Image (tube, rainbow, N blue to C red):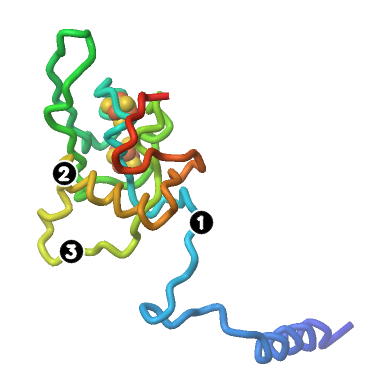
Amino acid sequence: MYGLGIAKGLFITLRHLFRRPFTIQYPEEVRHMPPGARTNLLWFDERCTGCSTCAQACPDGCILVVTSPREDGSLNKDRYEIDFRLCMFCGLCVEACPYEAIQSGGPFDDAVYVFDDMYRDKHALTRMAQAYLESHDYTYPNGKKAPRPGELVAVK
Ligand code: SF4
Ligand code: SF4
């Protein structure tokens, strides 16, 4: 019928006039982020074996793993670094890690004034991971329980 499309359009406009707005007043209000959202990358030292699978899976080459052998056959992680200047948060490293030592999640509002501050070594990554665990009842983004400070844990 002629004019039906216009009536439908006006009805939709009217309906939206009385709806609550979808926007939020950031930064006063912060939208809830589900755990595991690709907001950042969290590296958990206690789970990492230094196998470098994540570094090999990264298409941007932004993960650096440097290890040295221990007497018992395991590896010292001398360096573990992520260059967030290059990272596109594709999550391939997360999928590749056999030990769930790198997981998607963490802060999404960590903009920096100095670009080079987005290069994070294992100390900066550990600070970020610990801050996440402290604020999430020592639960990893994948839902598994993390060790509390002082608890000895083997990689599962
Ligand atoms: S999320 Fe993608 S680009 Fe970023 S470190 Fe992992 S594999 Fe590399
Ligand atoms: S984060 Fe995972 S894939 Fe990367 S070195 Fe550690 S255990 Fe291996």
Residues marked 2 and 3 touching at CB (< 8 Å) = no
Residues marked 1 and 3 touching at CB (< 8 Å) = no
State which quarter of the image contains the C terminus: top left
User: N-terminal of the two: label 1 or label 2?
Assistant: 1
Q: Where 98 sits versus 130, above or below?
A: above
Q: Where 87 sits versus 56, above or below?
A: below
Residue type marked 2: His
Residue type marked 1: Pro
Residue type marked 3: Val
Regarding residue 132, the answer to whether it shows in the image is: yes
- In the rendered image, residue 75, in percent from the top left (x then y), is placed at 20, 18
User: N-terminal of the two: label 2 or label 3?
Assistant: 3
Q: Which residue is disc 1 drawn over? A: 34
Say which of 84 and 143 sits in front.
Answer: 143
Whole-Å distance between the Cαs marked 2 and 3? 17 Å
Q: Secondary structure at mark 3?
A: loop
